[in-house]
């Protein structure tokens, strides 16, 4: 189920990129905009509190709109945007890893400084500064 959700998110991102592509006609742009907006909009045609029918519109309309839009769009536009989406996803993953490393380093420095500024701390400042230098290099 999770894989299907990831696939739909990726396809919606491809539709968004297709919406911005100048090779797509204005009618298809309008349709792709409607599909993407409906998928991310908190407003539904049938409210979710209505049993069964509330979720059926999300389960039927969004995949149906995705299929129609991807079928109507030119193949070369869809393929180009698939490649662009996968490149952007790789860049995002690389940035996410860089941010994690920076966050761990920042947390480590804050902890070390908190310990070193405490006058009752048994840890000597020289060890903390050496530890920070080792993390940096």
Image (cartoon, helix red, strand yellow):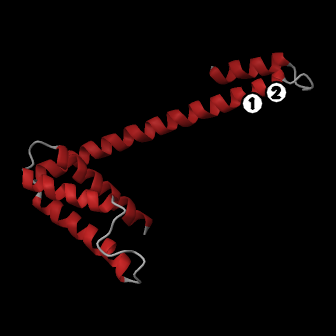
Question: Dividing the picture into quarters, in which one does residue 50 lie?
Answer: bottom left
Is 60 or 99 nearer to us in this picture?
60
Image position of 56 with respect to 82: above or below? below
Image position of 18 with respect to 31: above or below? above
Is 47 or 57 nearer to us in this picture?
47
Q: Quadrant of the N terminus?
A: bottom left
Question: Dividing the picture into quarters, in which one does residue 113 lie?
Answer: top right
Count neighbours of disc 2 (C-alpha within 10 A) and say few if under 14, some if 14 to 19, many if 20 or more. some
Q: Quadrant of the C terminus?
A: top right
Residue located 70% across and 30% down the image: 108
Question: Dividing the picture into quarters, in which one does residue 58 lie?
Answer: bottom left
Residue located 31% across and 41% down the image: 87
Image position of 132 with respect to 72: above or below? above
Label 2 sits on a secondary structure element that is helix
Count neighbours of disc 1 (C-alpha within 10 A) and say few if under 14, some if 14 to 19, many if 20 or more. few
Horizontal side of 92 relative to 107 (left or right) equals left
Q: Position of residue 45 (x, y in %)?
A: 28, 72
Residue located 15% across and 59% down the image: 31
Label 1 sits on a secondary structure element that is helix
Callout 2 touching callout 1 (CB < 8 Å): yes
Disc marking residue 111: 1
Q: Position of residue 120 (x, y in %)?
A: 93, 25
**Gap between marks 2 and 1 measured at Cα:** 6 Å
- Which residue is identified by label 2? 115
Q: Position of residue 136 (x, y in %)?
A: 63, 21
Q: Position of residue 32 (x, y in %)?
A: 18, 56
Horizontal side of 126 relative to 17 (left or right) equals right
Residue located 82% across and 20% down the image: 127
């Amino acid at each position: 189920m999770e894989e299907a959700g990831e696939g739909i998110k990726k396809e919606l991102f491809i539709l968004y990129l297709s919406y911005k592509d100048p090779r797509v006609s204005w009618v298809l742009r309008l349709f792709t905009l409607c599909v993407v907006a409906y998928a991310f909009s908190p407003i539904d045609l049938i409210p979710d509190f209505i049993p069964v029918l509330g979720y059926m519109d999300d389960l039927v309309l969004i995949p149906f709109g995705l299929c129609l839009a991807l079928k109507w769009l030119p193949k070369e536009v869809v393929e180009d945007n698939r490649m662009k989406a996968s490149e952007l996803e790789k860049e995002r993953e690389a940035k996410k890893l860089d941010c994690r490393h920076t966050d761990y380093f920042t947390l480590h420095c804050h902890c070390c400084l908190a310990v070193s500024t405490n006058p009752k701390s048994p840890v000597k400042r020289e060890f903390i500064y050496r530890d920070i230098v080792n993390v940096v290099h």
